[in-house]
Amino acid sequence: TRYLNRLKQDDDVCAEALQRAQILLFHRLSPLLQQTERGTFRAVALTSSEVLALLERLGSDRTKLKESVLIGCSEQDQVQFCLDVGKNSAFPPAGSGELDPVAVEEACDGAFVDLKKGLFVLRTSEAPLLAKAQALLRWHHTSRFCAATGQPTCRNQAGTQRVSSSGSVLLPSAQMSPVAIVLVSDGQRCLLARQPAFPPGMYSALAGFCELGESLEETASREVAEEVGLEVHSVSYSCSQHWPFPHSSFMLGCHALVSPAHTQLHVDQAELEDARWFSLQDVTSALQVRGLPQRGHAPPLWLPPKQAIANRLITEWAEHQRGSQKGG
Ligand SMILES: NC(=O)c1ccc[n+]([C@@H]2O[C@H](COP(=O)([O-])OP(=O)(O)OC[C@H]3O[C@@H](n4cnc5c(N)ncnc54)[C@H](O)[C@@H]3O)[C@@H](O)[C@H]2O)c1
Ligand SMILES: [Mg+2]
């Protein structure tokens, strides 16, 4: 952690680390992935010399390597950067050498995959890394000018901040929108809902963006009241997650209870397509469904993948229910 912090503070130390780094490639925010023998996908990680050789081979400017953005350090203390080889006018000279994505895919034996799809087939450990990398690259792309003065901004070597000519410092963390995601239970069942945009058959926990000045508990209570017309009590925090969609949501996961006497749902059709109570049995079988359901054979209930915090909340609820049933 201390070393990472030095990379963020000292451009020279960061430039030196880049030479020994692992670099994940993106093209217009889609990560370069490779299929493994087991049919899952992993991120293609290149060394800086492999990236330089690729840039040269595809007739691009070697200095493009310096546009890499620091993501962090792996468990094996390997410093990791990401680099978008697509048209990226966030990094001057504006539009410096977009690489032909097909040529990069052929050279690296991979494919640039939309992260929304990739997330479902990635190894669980890699999803957060690629989500963070994409969020950082998107932040640079949307922070080229200072919102207050309109002046162009420039970045530090690590890409962990941008500074405007008037000296104001922009930070990526400002881009995170806090969201309360709440799994509601009446003690026996859990409440899941689906938006029209969800894949057929998929239900998830209720979620909503925090409004300015709200606590997590207030957002959770408001969203449940707004979306299904129920009054929750005893909201308890469970876990959190950075979620890259639509643009870096900071998911704050919690559990909440409603009184078994007041479980009648009044679904806000403007927001949700459907909301239902599901039994432990329904949820247990849905948690066993692996991968993407075959087209035309959507199961009665399909849950978000393990990479999504909703899956973790639902799993926690099911484990708690089984525990209380065993405990009598
Ligand atoms: N990771 C998971 O398991 C999981 C599950 C469900 C939802 N989510 C995420 O939670 C987030 C919120 O879910 P929701 O769509 O139900 O929210 P929501 O119920 O607050 O409704 C979305 C609406 O909120 C408004 N809004 C307020 N602040 C916003 C902001 N900062 N950015 C974008 N829109 C904002 C917009 O009008 C938007 O249409 C989304 O990013 C969604 O992808 C994640
Ligand atoms: Mg919502």
Image (tube, rainbow, N blue to C red):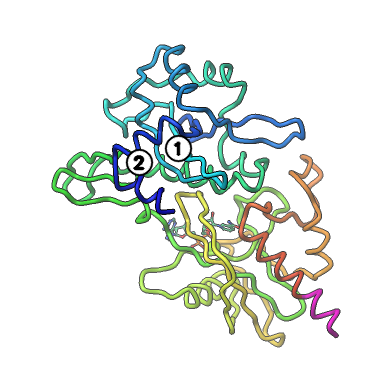
299 horizontally vs 250: left or right: right
The residue where tag 2 is placed is 158
Q: Residues within 10 Å of mark 2 (few under 14, many from 20)?
A: many
> x, y (%) of residue 302?
74, 54
Identify the image quadrant of residue 90: top left
Q: How far apart are the alpha carbons under marks 1 and 2?
A: 9 Å
The vertical placement of 208 against 87, above or below, is below
CB of mark 1 near ligand 1 (< 8 Å): no
> x, y (%) of residue 252?
52, 66
Q: 218 or 243: which is nearer to us?
A: 243
Q: Residues within 10 Å of mark 1 (few under 14, many from 20)?
A: many
Q: 82 or 268: which is nearer to us?
A: 82
61 horizontally vs 226: left or right: left
Name the amino acid, label 1: Phe
Name the amino acid, label 2: Ala
The residue where tag 1 is placed is 81
Residue found 67% across the figure and 35% down from its top: 41
**Residue 140 drawn in magenta:** no
The vertical placement of 125 against 103, above or below, is below
SS state under label 1: strand
> x, y (%) of residue 164?
19, 45
Q: 14 or 112: which is nearer to us?
A: 14
The region drawn magenta spans 321-328
SS state under label 2: loop
5 horizontally vs 274: left or right: left
- Quadrant assignment for the C terminus: bottom right
> x, y (%) of residue 68?
39, 33
Label pair 1/2, CB-CB below 8 angstroms: no
